[in-house]
Structures are given as C-alpha cells and as structure tokens.
Image (cartoon, rainbow, N blue to C red):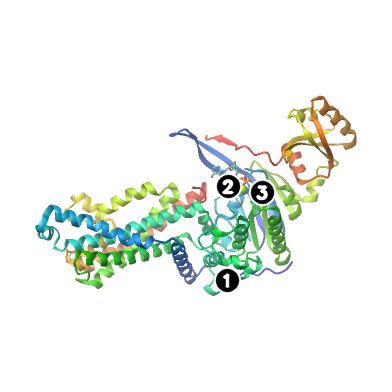
Amino acid sequence: MLGTVVIENLSKTYHTKQRKGLFKSIPRDVESLKGISLEVEEGEIFGLLGPNGAGKTTMIKILSTLLLPSSGSARLNGYDVVADDNAVRATVGCMLMGDRGLYWKLTGRENLIYFGALYHYSPADRKRRAQEIIDMLELGDLADRSVETYSSGQKMKLAFGKSLINDAPLLILDEPTNTLDVPSASELRAIVRQKNQQEGKTIIYTTHIMAEAETLCDRVAIIDYGQLLAIGRVPELKASLGREHITRIAGVIPSKAVEAVKALPAVSQATLGSVDGVAELTVMSHNGADTLARLIEVLGQIGATIQKITPQDVTLEDVFIAKTGRTLAENTAVETGAKK
Amino acid sequence: MTAISLPARKPGKASPATLVSATFATVRARLLIVSRYKGQLFNEILTPIVLAAMPILLGRATAGDRAAEVFLANTGTANYVGFMLIGSATFVIVSNAFWHIANWLRWEMETGTLESIYLTPTHRVFVAAGTGIYSTSRSTVGAFVAYLIGSAIMGINPFQGDLLIAFLFILCGLIPLFGMTLFYGALVLKLKEANAMLNLMQWVVNFLMGVFFPITVMPAAAQLVAKLFPPTWMTNGVRSAMLGVGYFFGEWYLDLAVLWFFMLAAPMLGIWAFKKIENSVRRNEGVGQF
Ligand SMILES: Nc1ncnc2c1ncn2[C@@H]1O[C@H](COP(=O)(O)OP(=O)(O)OP(=O)(O)O)[C@@H](O)[C@H]1O
Ligand SMILES: [Mg+2]
C-alpha cells in the first residue's frame, strides 16, 4: 500500500470568469483534467510529462489534497485524497511551487523546524530531523542564514529538503528543476535518484522537459489538454513508434515547410521548432534514407536554406510529436467552454 | 527494495499534545519573523495613546472644567481619561486581532506558504490559533504599556478598582475574539481581499464596542447590535471593574457569564465557517491563488 498511487477517472473543472473590461465578465469553465486513470507502483520514479497548461500541476494539487477533484478518485499510500486527507498529508512529501512556500524571513533551519512541528514531531525530533536534512543536502552554513539571502538554486534545494521532513514513502515533485541551471538541476536529480534507490521512495516527478524524464524516470505518463496520451516505460514508448525514422533539419526554414513535407507519402509527422534561435524541422518518416533525397528536394523548392541534417534516435519528445503533431515548446492554448 | 522507515507514529493521527505544540511553534515562528522587522512595537504603543488623546482633549475643549461632571452624569464615572484610555487600549487589541489574521492570510497566500501549511497534517485552525495567540499577546502587551504611559501623561492612577476582575474580563474576551477573527479570516480566504474590509470593520468595531462613549448613549437598536459583539462586553467589564461605570446585568459574574457563552459560541461558529469556506475554495481554485 505504502508508496503506491491509484488514480481513477480523475477530472477537474475550474469555474472562472472571463473578464470583459472593468465590470463585465462571462462565466467560463476550464476543464483541466478529463478523466485520467493511472497507477504508480511502489518504488518507481514516475514521470508526469506534458507541455505548459497540460494539467500536471492541477493533478499534483489534487494528489496533495490542495484541491478537491470534480469527479473521480485518487488513493495515495492506500488513503483516499478526499476521505482520508490528513493521512495523505502525513504520508506524502511534496515540493509544489518551487522556491515559494518557504518563510523567507526565517533561516533554512527555522523553516525545517517549524514545518517539523506541523508534521507532529516532538520539539527534540524536529531539531534532529532538520539537522539530518541539512547534512543530507549539504546545506552547511547556509542553514542558519535567512532564506531571503539564498540564491534561487539554494532556495529550491531547501524547498526539496522541506518535502523530506516527514520522511514519507511517496514524494511528489512538481517541476523541481524549473529555475535551476544545468549543474544544479543534475545535482537535484542525483539526490532524487538516491532517495529512490537507497530508501526505496516512490517518486512522482513532473516536467515538461522530455530529456529530463528520459534520464530519470522508470515510467512516464504523457498528458496533454488534461488527457492521458500515453503511459509506459521509456523504451516501450519509444518502441511504440515502430520503425519510424527521425530526421532533424536545421537552417532557414519557412513555416510552409511543414505542410510541404507532410505531403510526402513516407512522412508521418513534421513539426517546426527552434533550437538556439535556429529553425529546426523534425520529420518522422517510414524509410529514412529514401525520403531524405525527397525532403531536400521539397525544401529546396520552397526556398529553405539547409544548414545541417541529423538523423536521430527516437526520443520521448518524438513520442509526443507523433501523438499530437506539436512540439513540447508550443504552449497548450487555454481551452475553455462557455458555461451551460 | 529497502524497507521504508516511517516516523514512529500513526500517519495523520495527531494527539492533543502535538497540536498544542504545533500551535506554539506557530507563535514562535511569528515572533521570529516580526523580530526581523524593527519598529513595530513602537507603533503599537503609540497608537492607543494618540487614539485616546483625541477625545480626551475634545472633551476638555467642549465641556471645559465641567467635563468630568458631565461625564459622571452620563457614564457613572468622572474619570473620563481612564475611560478613554481603557477604550482605546481594548480597541487596539480587537482591531489588531482582525488585522493580524487578515494580513497573515493575505501574506501567506502571496508567498505560497499557505499552501505549504495546507500540505501538512496540522489543521489550519491551529495555525490560525497560533497566529491569534501571537497577535493578542503582542497587542495586549503593547496596549498595557500604552495604558500605563497614557495614564502617566494624563495624570491619572492606572491601577484602581477591581483589577482581578478586569483581568478576567480581558482573558475571557480574547477567546470569542479569536472565534470572530476566524470567521473574518474565512471571508479573506474566499474574497482574497483584506484592506477594504478591514477599513470598514475598523470603524464599525470602534463604534459598536463603545471606544469613546458608553453604548448606553446609543439608540436602542444599535445597543442591541453592540451587545451581540463580544468585545463590547469585554470593554464594559473592564471599565466597570476599574471605574465603576456599571455592568450591563448589574453584577460582574452575570456579565462574565455572557462572555463565557460567547467563548463557546464564537469559536465554534468561526471554525465552522472557516472549514466550510475552505472546502468551497478547495473545490474550485484552491488557496494558492490570490
Ligand atoms: N485557478 C485556475 N482557474 C482557471 N483555470 C486554471 C486555474 N489553474 C489552472 N488553470 C488552467 O488549467 C490548465 C492546466 O493548468 P496546470 O497548471 O495544471 O498546467 P501544467 O501542466 O502544470 O502547466 P505548466 O507546465 O505551465 O506548469 C491550464 O489551461 C490553466 O490555464
Ligand atoms: Mg505546472
């Protein structure tokens, strides 16, 4: 039971108002989750992937009891998020809003001790637990400085430390590396992995960076517009694309290239993104070598300048592209429906 | 798979001792935070003195030498200076209680710490209680010091009458006050707004609890409303004990019994409203939005 999550048909609709100037507003319903079912097993690192606005945070907030679901149910460590909310809170560690959620006027240690009190530790145990976390994360002298003097990476580390206070068998981390630079992010991932491997903690990890999920997660669920697109082990998901070949073409590429390339019979999917300011066309095709010549020809006809062509292994990002026809960087437009 | 070690306690099962401990940890955290902002206590002492000085001087200006005489006829005490000082000191305690809970909620909403509190198995009512204890102890100390200084400046004896009974009225008045602030906090949670409401509250409270005048000079209907407001009983109790203005029901224990009733009713109503509104907020956008 401990360390497991069972989600059944979970839905969440926000009731909001669409503002029209100063006084007018129209009620709007935003369906953020549309009947998601999935299970997380004990001891796995489970990735929740999706572009901005996919519904990841909404899902995490329901799992952590901050929000009540509109329908459906979720059980964490065997406890229901609605009926046994306090038991869920006691047995789950959460890092939800990055470096927000800490008292900036208090020191790192004072933060940990105070939250220890809210997790019902005795005064002596609070201090001991705070010290354990300080040592574990190698916070050192930082622990006794007020949080407002921390760098954003240090704040994130402390926020992660806060999620460890109750030593829960299940950790929920919502984009924990969001504002971190590359070395800090990989340091944090290493600690997460360590918590998983050495202490057997189950971890739910959301991100919109597919590469991060690939390196860290045992299994991932890809959600988009509040719906589950795919779920499985990373190699399985990649294999699900069959014998697709991925070709990335960088250069000066007009947007009409997408349509032109898609018109080729062997091409199953094409998207245009940009990497470091250079346009990059990702093409998925059934027979790589044969299509390449045709690709170059078509791009030449519409006036594209090709700088680099790279055949590539399938990534999780390609799985997302194959399912949606979009890259992850493209925002999910807010989908709203007028209230009935 | 390695064994998972949970802290040695049943998850989610808090004991009364751990809840009291969490409440006082909150008081401690608030004190630590405020200690890092200087100059606050000074404000707290100055406000009641300035507040009381205005009507005292107004009284001297309009009624001249006969101020005490007129006041005696209307209120039962000639000591209008003490009357005003007690009124403004209790008012500061009451008004601060509302400000503190509202500012606490708004501030924690904005910094995201409110969500952090909601992630823990300690119910928010205990964190609010900690904030309430912090608020009242802080402003009671401030108000008391202000009362002493005010008395010295205006040349009256600060210790007269039945001090023990006066103390009982303050103590018993603080608990219903907490219940009321919880009710008010629930509104802030829902409306995500505090300042406009606080400003209005400020004057309504000031009027109702009879800060500058005995409520017996108010119209009958207004008196009735004022008597539904627990701080009115607190202020009048303290004034009666110290200055002999007269209890509403004639005897101190009868008035105190009314406060005892409020002591049960107001927190119950407050907690009920807070939980109800909190669930409606969780059913929609959650406490993290502001
Ligand atoms: N309080 C709210 N009221 C109305 N709509 C909301 C509210 N909170 C979120 N939404 C909408 O719900 C959808 C899902 O949002 P959510 O924050 O869960 O996405 P996300 O996957 O976490 O995105 P990101 O990667 O940007 O963090 C979005 O369309 C968002 O606009
Ligand atoms: Mg999010």
Q: Which residue is mark 2?
A: A71
Residue at disc 1, secondary structure:
loop
Q: Is residue B88 left or right of residue A334?
A: left
Binning the other alpha carbons within 10 Å of mark 2 as few (below 14), some (14 to 19) or many (20 upward) gives: some
User: What percent of the width, then of the height, locates residue A318?
Assistant: 77, 42
User: In 3D space, how far apart are the residues under numbered discs 1 and 3 (Cα atoms)?
Assistant: 31 Å
Question: Residue A37 shows which numbered tag?
Answer: 3
Q: Is residue B80 left or right of residue B257?
A: left
Tell me the chain of label 2: A
Tell me the chain of label 1: B
Which amino acid type is shown beneath numbered disc 1?
Answer: Arg
Q: Nearer the viewer, mark 1 or mark 3?
A: 1
Q: Is residue B233 left or right of residue B17?
A: left
Q: Quadrant of ligand 1?
A: top right
Tell me the chain of label 3: A
Residue at 51 percent across and 40 percent down: it is A16
Q: Earlier in the sequence, mark 2 or mark 3?
A: 3
Q: The N terminus of chain A is located in which quarter?
A: bottom right
Query: Are tags 1 and 3 found on a single chain?
Result: no
Residue at disc 3, secondary structure:
strand
Question: Residue B103 shows which numbered tag?
Answer: none
Q: Nearer the viewer, mark 1 or mark 2?
A: 1
Query: Are tags 1 and 2 found on a single chain?
Result: no
Which amino acid type is shown beneath numbered disc 2?
Answer: Ser
- Can residue A174 be seen here? yes
User: In 3D space, how far apart are the residues under numbered discs 2 and 3 (Cα atoms)?
Assistant: 12 Å
Q: Is residue B240 left or right of residue A245?
A: left
Q: Which residue is mark 1?
A: B9
Residue at 47 percent across and 59 percent down: it is B124
Query: Are tags 2 and 3 found on a single chain?
Result: yes
